[in-house]
Amino acid sequence: MMLLPFQSILHFDSFNPSRSDPVPEFPYSFRCRRTRSPALTKAAFKRNVDNKNDKEKKPNICTADELHYVHVDKSEWKVALWRYLPSPQAPTRNHPLMLLSGVGTNAIAYDLSPESSFARFMCSQGYDTWILELRGAGLSTQGMDFGQYKDPLDSISQRKDFFGKDTDYKSFLETEKRYAFASQITDLIEKLVNIIEEVERSSPVRAFDMQNSISTALKDMQKQLDLIAKYDWDFVNYLEEDVPAAMEYIKDKSEPKDGKLLAIGHSMGGILLYAMLSRCGKDPGLSAVTTLASSLDYMSSRSSLKLLLPLADPAQVLNVPVIPIGTLLAAAHPFAANPPYLLSWLSPQISAPDMLQPKLFEKLVTENFETVPAKLLLQLATAFEEGGLRDRSGTFFYKNHLSKSNVPVLAIAGDQDLICPPDAVYETVKLIREPLVTYKVFGEPGGPHFAHYDIVGAQRAVDLVYPCIIEFLNHHDAA
């Protein structure tokens, strides 16, 4: 099995485990002194470690072995960590493994089913595996006591309030604010439908049905103004607060001797890891990083997300506080999966044909996605501008500092990924110093093909993608 070195990167090769390739020689793994991220104060770290209720009784939605919560400093949030304990039959590993999900998603994509579970595969190889659910996603919570939780499977109109008893709701329930938000939602619906009609005009009747479906789902959100008003964060909050808090917690529980973690990020999760390498230079607290369908610069690529960039404009112009990705996808799914397939273009954005079983595809679409702040999407939209993704000040361009990192990176792309195509992945990979990066595109001309989520949860990924990642992790875990 051969992992392509950097100098072969221009050949968008595919991976086939049946090839009799020699065992590759991996680049040297640099060792750095152990330090804790300055973004997490000592007081906050002690509060995380000393909390007696950090491990919670799991709700049914959590399929991990354990569910943990960790307080995020400078906020009311407690992010959720799904923990998968290493198999006692597997070799003992030196580092725990942290998994980061994409924008507006929870832990479900990493554990779709027993047969297609990225997290279960990793713990079966001996890794103490943790999935981080960032603020606002999945079981992460705000202003509540440990032991309470919200269920991502519940529809918005059925979700029970999960804030603390002392929360002041009056400021969020003022009549004029409700009317203002109702007006914003109405305007957003019109913008969304106009965008969709530009993509496909084949069935006016179904378009009207779809508009009603989306309108009903979005108006349900007016019942949750107390929740929506709290959705006020961006990419930098994830990068400088949520992820460092989770890393310190995982280190305390797993106790790696060198104080480092292995990390894998899908989509925005990989973007977060790239941003960490840019910000922290030679000592981000990571032994090695794997990114799945991630890039800091999409400007010159053929990413289909460019078609959705108009969503950022109405969100900004109309001052809509949130973009309900999960609600929109759940409402749109029947129009993509059933005749006359009004939104037939939606499914390939997520999975290539025949890669995900219909039930797993439906589970992914209806249960994996969440509501996100508009300001988060507006910041991520800078990845489509000259210079790529930048921080909230607009002055720090993450890709310009990636070459300072000493952390080995395995960057993986899918041959039919429309959201983050191989050319987008390459735009970031080419900036990493040659001895440290390995680049891989999965997919064969005659199939199988891999779209955005196939490299994480498709059954063929278990046979093709996962072994590639494990070989990379094992090398750097032992280095």
Image: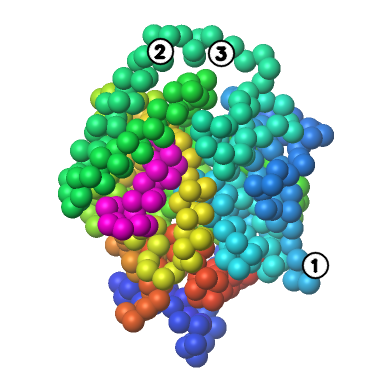
Q: Which residue is disc 3 drawn over?
A: 169
Residue range (magenta): 323-344
Q: Which residue is disc 2 drawn over?
A: 177
Q: CA distance from mark 2 to mark 1?
A: 55 Å
At label 2, counting other C-alpha atoms closer than 10 Å, the crowd grade (few under 14, some 14-19, many 20 or more) is few
Q: Point out residue 245 in the picture as x, y percentages from the top left corner.
A: 63, 38
Image-based side of 348 in relation to 477, left or right: left
Q: Which residue type carries mark 3?
A: Tyr
The answer to whether one can see residue 281 in this image is no
Mark 2 or mark 1: name the one nearer the start of the chain.
1
Quadrant for residue 350, please give it. bottom left
Image-based side of 107 in relation to 455, left or right: right
Q: Which residue is disc 1 drawn over?
A: 88
**Magenta residue check for 328:** yes
Disc 1 or disc 3, which is closer to the eye? Answer: 3
Q: Are marks 2 and 1 in contact (CB under 8 Å)?
A: no
Mark 1, secondary structure of its residue: loop
Q: CA distance from mark 3 to mark 2?
A: 12 Å
Q: Which residue type carries mark 2?
A: Lys
Disc 2 or disc 1, which is closer to the eye? Answer: 2
Which residue: 40% across, 76% down? Answer: 448
The coloring applied to the image is rainbow
Q: Point out residue 134 in the picture as x, y percentages from the top left corner.
A: 55, 40
